[in-house]
Image (cartoon, rainbow, N blue to C red):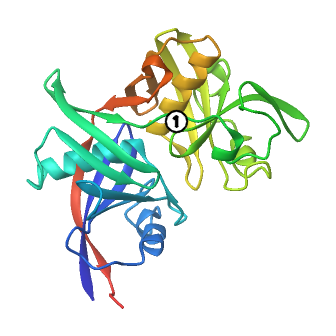
């Protein structure tokens, strides 16, 4: 029996298990994600982050949901930066990560005595082919989406991972995320499933959200969900190109200057380090 070092990290309540595999052989990461992310029987987390070498960037960051599917995680980028700095692997203020959907540049700075990480999440897409979504429209904006006879106005945004953004009064999701989220995630119109982000536009500069993440369920925070919410709110005239986006786990700053690339800014922290019993095959 060998023991695999891991670090528990979190960003706005999005808690993740991080494995430093920069000098480690390839493992069955999807299976490891299922085991380590399990509540009660594992470490318990919203996903598994794996740092591996990259030939195209400074580092490659892979993210796996608790069901083993590979995805993209905006909060995970910030967690990786904090881990690299804390362990003395890299203290540079400008890094490029290779992610599942391409290269992501991050910059670090301080605000109110805390390290803040600003990540370029790339340009968002609302094209059905990029979601993907089996919907016969050019872009999925304020689309009337029928779920068992109930109609929800959805705006589908992909920021590396897809979200169906639904605007509704905060009272409908403040205490509990709507149960229909699961049905929307697994609706036949979304062959690769979709995350669902419920949003209330408090003001043109302030949004409140709750996200049901595909392959995860309800989480306290979601970086890509915050990006998708700002993009959708801007397109519907509910927000400008910059806003603070608050989830139950905390607040992120999201910018969409000139409707080009989306930028996500926030903090992250290390919770604890541990050892996971692992049998190498």
Total labels drawn = 1
- On the image, the x and y values in percent for residue 168 come to 68, 21
Which residue is farthest front? 56
- On the image, the x and y values in percent for residue 256 come to 45, 22
- On the image, the x and y values in percent for residue 46 come to 45, 53
- On the image, the x and y values in percent for residue 89 come to 11, 56
184 in relation to 52, above or below: above
> Who's the residue at 25% across and 85% down the image?
2
Res 131 seen here: no
Of residues 172 and 87, the one drawn nearer to the viewer in this rendering: 87
Quadrant of residue 27 within the rendered picture: bottom left
Query: Which residue carries the number 1 mark?
Result: 225
Can you say which quadrant of the picture contains the N terminus? Answer: bottom left
Quadrant of residue 82 within the rendered picture: top left
Which residue is farthest right? 149
173 in relation to 60, above or below: above
Can you say which quadrant of the picture contains the C terminus? Answer: bottom left
Of residues 156 and 56, the one drawn nearer to the viewer in this rendering: 56
> Who's the residue at 34% across and 54% down the image?
98
Please tell me how crowded label 1 is: few (under 14), some (14-19), or many (20+) other residues with Cα within 10 Å: many
Tell me the SS state at disc 1: helix
> Who's the residue at 57% across and 15% down the image?
201
Res 96 seen here: yes
Which residue is farthest top? 203
Horizontal side of 118 relative to 177 (left or right) equals: left
71 in relation to 36, above or below: above
Quadrant of residue 44 within the rendered picture: bottom left
Horizontal side of 154 relative to 222 (left or right) equals: right
């Amino acid at each position: 029996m060998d023991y695999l070092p891991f670090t528990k990290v979190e960003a706005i309540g999005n808690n993740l298990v991080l494995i430093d595999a920069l000098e480690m052989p390839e493992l069955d990461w999807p299976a490891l994600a299922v085991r380590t992310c399990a509540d009660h029987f594992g470490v318990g987390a919203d996903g598994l982050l794996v740092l591996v070498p990259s030939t195209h960037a400074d580092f490659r960051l892979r993210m796996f949901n608790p069901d083993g599917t590979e995805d993209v995680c905006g909060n995970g980028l910030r967690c990786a930066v904090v881990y690299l700095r804390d362990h003395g692997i890299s203290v540079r203020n400008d890094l490029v990560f290779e992610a599942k959907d391409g290269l992501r540049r991050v910059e670090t700075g301080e605000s109110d005595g805390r390290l803040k990480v600003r990540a370029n999440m790339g340009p968002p897409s609302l094209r059905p082919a990029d979601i993907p979504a089996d919907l016969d429209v050019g872009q999925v904006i304020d689309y009337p989406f029928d779920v068992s006879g109930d109609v929800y106005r959805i705006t589908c945004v992909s920021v590396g991972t897809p979200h169906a953004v639904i605007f509704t009064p905060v009272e409908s999701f403040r205490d509990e995320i709507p149960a229909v989220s699961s049905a929307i995630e697994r609706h036949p119109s979304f062959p690769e499933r979709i995350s669902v982000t419920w949003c209330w536009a408090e003001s043109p500069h302030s949004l409140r959200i709750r996200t049901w993440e595909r392959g995860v369920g309800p989480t306290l925070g979601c970086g890509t969900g915050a990006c998708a919410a700002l993009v959708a709110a801007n397109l519907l005239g509910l927000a400008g190109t910059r806003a603070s986006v608050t989830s139950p786990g905390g607040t992120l700053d999201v910018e969409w200057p000139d409707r080009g690339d989306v930028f996500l800014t926030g903090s992250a922290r290390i919770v604890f380090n541990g050892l996971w019993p692992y049998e190498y095959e």
